[in-house]
Image (cartoon, rainbow, N blue to C red):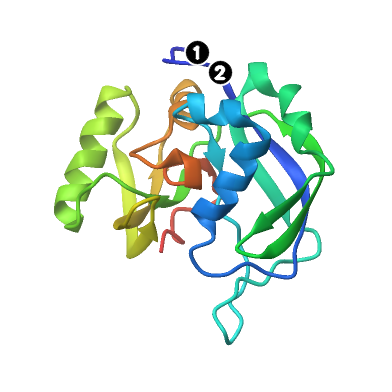
Amino acid sequence: MNRTGPEMVDVAFGFSAPGLPVDHEWPLYREVARRVPWMRAFAGAGIHPLRGPRGPDGVLLLARRAKLTLRMPRERVCAASALEDAVLDVCGIEVRIGRGTMRAFDPAPTLYAARVVTGDEDEAAFSAGIAAELAALGAARNFICGRRALVRMEASAVPAFSVAVHGLAGDASLRLQNLGLGQGRAIGCGLLVPHKTITTAQ
């Protein structure tokens, strides 16, 4: 596989918490990086966005089988065991981490990222930037941009769009998963995962 940087994989950890507040991403990343500080040295490493319904108070409600999934260099998988059985403090909420399982990438023809950040606020400028980035990576430039949202980074909130890239050959799919798109990998922005359809990028 033609790539730049280390070979990346996903590691999914058991994850237990009553819920997490809005804008929990940076506090969660800081707590994880406190346990595995080497994550800060890898620009492509980060935490996949957590999914779940929002409660009436805006808290993200987590399923009993929720997973905390980290994208990290394959060479650091064994070192990631430092997270197993850890208890984290995220915004005053106790988060318990379980055992981790490595997941190799699947060369899927359609990839999806719930949030991609390029620094562009306008969708047209954002789309032009994504097209250029895909071209530079030698990937198919067939993609759909979804709804605009604000994502809180370490210092400020920035605009993000969801992106589905489709029509990918196997090697291009693996390369995109390995490298990602845009900025902000630490909190899951630009981390691409296989997707069954191209109709839900929103």
C-alpha span from label 2 to label 1? 9 Å
Nearest to the observer: residue 116 or residue 33:
33
Q: Secondary structure at mark 1?
A: loop
As rendered, which of 71 and 177 lies closer to the eye?
71
Front position in the image: 50 or 123: 50
Amino acid type for the residue under numbered disc 2: Glu
In percent of width and height, residue 113 lies at: 45, 48
Residue at mark 1: 1
- Residue type, mark 1 in image: Met
- Tell me which corner region of the image, top left, top right, bottom left or bottom right, holds residue 156: bottom left
Instruction: Check if mark 2's residue and mark 1's residue have beta carbons within 8 Å.
Output: yes
| Residue at numbered disc 2 | 7
Is 30 positioned to the left or the right of 84 in the image?
left
- Percent position (x, y) of residue 100? 79, 37
Asked if residue 183 shows in the view, the reply is: yes
Q: Position of residue 61 (x, y in %)?
A: 67, 72
Tell me if mark 1 has few (under 14), some (14-19) or many (20+) residues whose alpha carbon lies within 10 angstroms of its own.
Answer: few
Q: Is residue 19 above or below residue 29?
A: below
Q: Is residue 24 above or below residue 7?
A: below
- Assign the C terminus to one quadrant of the image: bottom left
